[in-house]
Amino acid sequence: MDRVEPMTLFGYKKLQAEMKDLKENQRPATVKAIEEALEHGDLKENAEYHAAKEQQRLIDGRMIELSELIQSAKIVDPSQLEHTKVSFGSTVVLLDLDADEEVTYTIVGGCESNPELGLISFSSPLAKQLLGREEGDDFKVKLPSGTKEYEIVEVKYQEIVFECHD
């Protein structure tokens, strides 16, 4: 079964930029570090060599992961979707019925999530409970912090801010 990973164009470009950096900068620098460490001789006690090899293994693993994400990417423009019900790219204002506090989340792709900015992955437990719901709906969700009860105050589309600019 082919996996589909929805994301915005921002997320897709972010993945491509990371892959480019790994291919063109980080991996070649690591290969050079391995070559330099090999010149020091005895590999058993060559900490630089072992550190560089471990770094190369981590970079190669991340490149495989990024390649799979890029291949399975489905770029979605949330501004083109209807947001009468919660969907990818929706910004949702929730009332935490236990704490009587409003919280706002925007549903984004997994590689774009940033809870500090209110961006949650479409595959997170909360987002899974939100998808398809409408304003006025009440629901309970089991989160790592325990079971919470929410009411959906508002569902809307607004431009997504992916990075904090200080």
Image (tube, grey):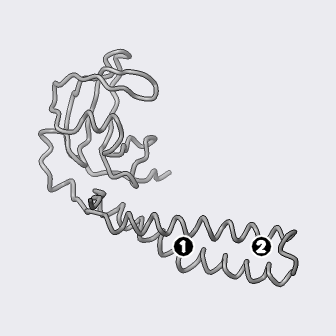
Query: Which sits earlier in the primary sequence, circle 1 or circle 2?
Result: 1
- Name the secondary structure under disc 2: helix
How far from the left and from the top, in percent, is residue 16? 41, 71
Q: How many marks?
A: 2
Residue type, numbered disc 2: Tyr
Q: Nearer the viewer, mark 1 or mark 2?
A: 2
Residue beneath the point at 27% across and 51% down = 159
Q: Secondary structure at mark 1?
A: helix
What residue appears at the point 26 percent right and 63 percent down from the top-left corner? 75
- Tell me residue 31's x, y (percent): 66, 80
Rendered location of residue 26, percent (x, y):
60, 74
Question: Residue at point 34% right, 16% down?
Answer: 100
Mark 1 neighbour density, 10 Å: few (under 14) some (14–19) many (20 or more): some
Residue on which the image places disc 2: 49
Indicate the amino acid at tag 1: Leu
Identify the residue shown where x is 33% and y is 34%: 126
Q: Give the residue at mark 1.
A: 22
Q: Is residue 37 left or right of residue 120?
A: right
Expressed as whole percent of the image width and height from the top left, the position of residue 55 reads 66, 67
- Residue 99 to residue 1: above or below: above
Is 115 left or right of 90, judged from the image as shown? Answer: right
